[in-house]
Image (spheres, helix red, strand yellow):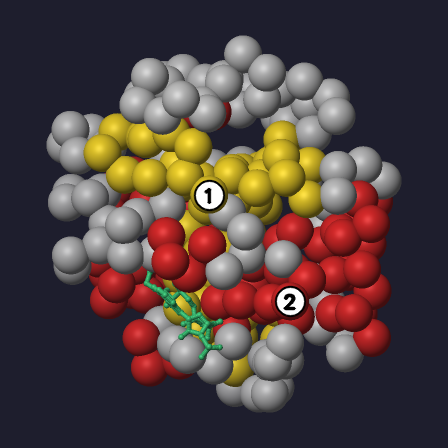
């Protein structure tokens, strides 16, 4: 995970909390990336997600939204990363990596390790594998297609180090990012909750999936 701090982000990117005025810009970037990646017909779901309770960090360059990523946590040291997306013309510049690390660094104030999930896509799984995420289960989109649900456990020491390093580089969320603790991350174990990415884990697909314990404290 910490190895992803290098190489560092070279461009001047402003990271700030999502605001409702960002809705259309975020939707446009989603649409640019939708083909062959996201389940068909999910645009409305994505719009609902933007209007939901996930904490979303927006990356902005020259007053233009160029990427974003969401995070939700529950009270059992589980976090769920969602919709890490970068506009195609800005991909490959470490923005997606920084958005991932910056979201994880938001967990620093809890002072404990976290089990972090990503509802990935086949095309994005190799990207998340670089952070140590490993596929543990499947999640099923509304169209019946299965996609990888991957997870990684990150120690408090690692979360703190990521936060300190980004902060030293001036990579911080400018403004207050509300990170609501949701008791309901039922998306990890069963059919999902409103306002989030709707999926159902196929808990029997992989032998290491153990939804009975993913919610336990470390
Ligand atoms: C996946 C995504 C967020 C990565 O953001 P990014 O800013 O392009 O990525 P970075 O520049 O931080 O990439 C870091 C490294 O990961 C690699 N990488 C990026 N996307 C990758 C992918 N899909 N598979 C494998 N490696 C990938 C890059 O080549 C780079 O490697 P390098 O440092 O050795 O050159 C972005 O490409 C994207 O939005 N893709 C489309 C939407 C998507 O799939 N989102 C995930 C939804 S779950």
Which quarter of the rendered image does ligand 1 occupy? bottom left
Tell me, yes or no, whether the two marked residues, 1 and 2, touch with CB atoms within 8 Å. Answer: no
Residue 5: image x %, image y %? Answer: 66, 70
**Above-or-below relation of 142 to 72:** above
Label 2: how many Cα within 10 Å (few below 14, some 14–19, many 20+): few
Q: Quadrant of residue 54?
A: top right
In which quadrant will I find the N terminus? bottom right
Q: Is residue 97 left or right of residue 37?
A: right
The residue beneath circle 1 is 134
Residue at mark 1 to residue at mark 2: CA–CA distance: 16 Å
Instruction: Name the foreground residue: 184 vs 1.
Output: 1
Does the image show residue 216? Answer: yes
Residue drawn at (52%, 76%), measured in percent from left and top? 94
Q: Mark 2 — residue? A: 3
Please state which of residues 160 and 103 is positioned toward the viewer in this rendering.
160
- For the question of whether residue 180 can be seen, the reply is no
Task: State the quadrant of the C terminus.
Answer: top right
On the image, the x and y values in percent for residue 31 come to 24, 60
């Amino acid at each position: 995970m910490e190895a992803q701090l290098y190489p560092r982000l070279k461009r001047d990117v402003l990271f700030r909390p999502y605001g409702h005025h960002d809705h259309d810009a975020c939707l446009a970037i989603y649409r640019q990336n939708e083909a062959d990646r996201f389940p068909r017909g999910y645009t409305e779901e994505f719009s609902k997600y933007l209007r939901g309770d996930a904490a979303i960090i927006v990356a902005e360059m020259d007053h233009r939204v160029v990427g974003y990523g969401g995070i939700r946590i529950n009270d059992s040291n589980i976090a769920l990363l969602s919709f890490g997306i970068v506009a195609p013309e800005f991909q490959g510049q470490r923005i997606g990596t920084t958005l991932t690390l910056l979201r994880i660094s938001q967990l620093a104030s809890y002072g404990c390790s976290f089990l972090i999930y990503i509802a990935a896509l086949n095309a994005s799984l190799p990207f998340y594998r670089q952070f140590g995420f490993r596929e543990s289960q499947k999640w099923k989109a509304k169209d019946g297609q299965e996609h990888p649900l991957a997870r990684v456990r990150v120690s408090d020491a690692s979360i703190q180090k990521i936060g300190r390093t980004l902060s030293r580089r001036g990579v911080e969320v400018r403004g207050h990012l509300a990170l609501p603790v949701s008791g309901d991350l039922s998306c990890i174990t069963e059919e999902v909750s409103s306002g989030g990415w709707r999926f159902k884990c196929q808990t029997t697909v992989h032998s290491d999936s153990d939804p009975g314990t993913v919610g336990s404290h470390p």
